[in-house]
Image (cartoon, helix red, strand yellow):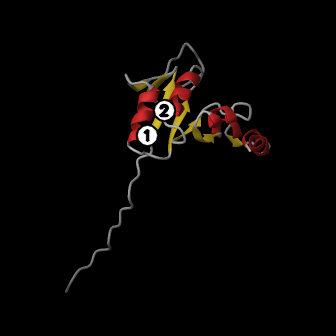
């Protein structure tokens, strides 16, 4: 008597590149350690020696799609803009995006803007901000 096992199907895995910026540098931070308190710096798992633009150029060369740049706190704008310029249309941008600055990042090369920090307040979706966001970016 033959035994049949169900066929295991593994979908194709796609690598989605990510550039997390903290103080203008590419870092991997232990998430729960990131705070606004300057006396409590975050715990870092990894700090890159390459610039955000270098990572973005590598992702462009490898034709990796669907990646994003996340600005974790202040001091990241110049690095984020450099990354977007290195891979125009190839990266999304998030972290502090609002109706006043979204168009600037789209014009600088972002494929999309990520608005999580804007539309969620105190852990809840602020539905009043959704139409406002649409006015900012069309």
Quadrant housing residue 10: bottom left
Give me the disc on residue 86.
2
Q: Where in the figure is residue 112, as x and y percent of width and height? A: 60, 43
Q: Where in the figure is residue 49, as x and y percent of width and height? A: 37, 22
Q: Secondary structure at mark 1?
A: helix
- Count of all numbered marks drawn on residues in the image: 2
Contact? badges 1 and 2 (CB < 8 Å): yes
Q: Residues within 10 Å of mark 1 (few under 14, many from 20)?
A: some
Q: Earlier in the sequence, mark 1 or mark 2?
A: 1
Quarter of the C terminus within the rendering: top right
Report how far apart the C-alphas of labels 1 and 2 lie in the structure. Answer: 8 Å
Give me the disc on residue 60.
1
On the picture, is 104 further left or further right than 89?
A: right
Q: Residues within 10 Å of mark 2 (few under 14, many from 20)?
A: many
Quadrant housing residue 98: top right
Q: Residue at x 26, y 78 (%)?
A: 4
Q: For this rendering, which residue is in front, 42 or 26?
A: 26
Q: Residue at x 39, y 61 (%)?
A: 11
Identify whether 17 is placed above or below 50: below
Identify whether 131 is placed above or below 45: below
Q: For this rendering, which residue is in front, 39 or 87?
A: 87
Residue at the extreme top: 39
Q: Where in the figure is residue 120, as x and y percent of width and height? A: 69, 39
Q: Where in the figure is residue 63, as x and y percent of width and height? A: 42, 45
Q: For this rendering, which residue is in front, 41 or 89?
A: 89
């Amino acid at each position: 008597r033959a035994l049949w096992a169900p066929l295991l199907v593994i979908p194709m895995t796609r690598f989605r590149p990510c550039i997390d910026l903290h103080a203008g540098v590419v870092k991997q931070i232990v998430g729960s350690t990131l705070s606004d308190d300057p006396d409590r710096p975050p715990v870092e798992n990894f700090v890159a020696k390459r610039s955000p633009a270098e990572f973005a150029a590598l992702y462009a060369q490898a034709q990796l799609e669907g990646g994003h740049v996340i600005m974790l706190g202040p001091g990241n704008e110049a690095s984020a803009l450099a990354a977007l310029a290195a891979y125009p249309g190839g990266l999304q941008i998030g972290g502090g995006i609002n109706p006043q600055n979204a168009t600037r990042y789209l014009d600088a090369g972002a494929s999309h803007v990520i608005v999580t920090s804007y539309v969620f307040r105190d852990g809840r979706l602020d539905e009043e901000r959704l139409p406002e966001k649409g006015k900012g970016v069309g």
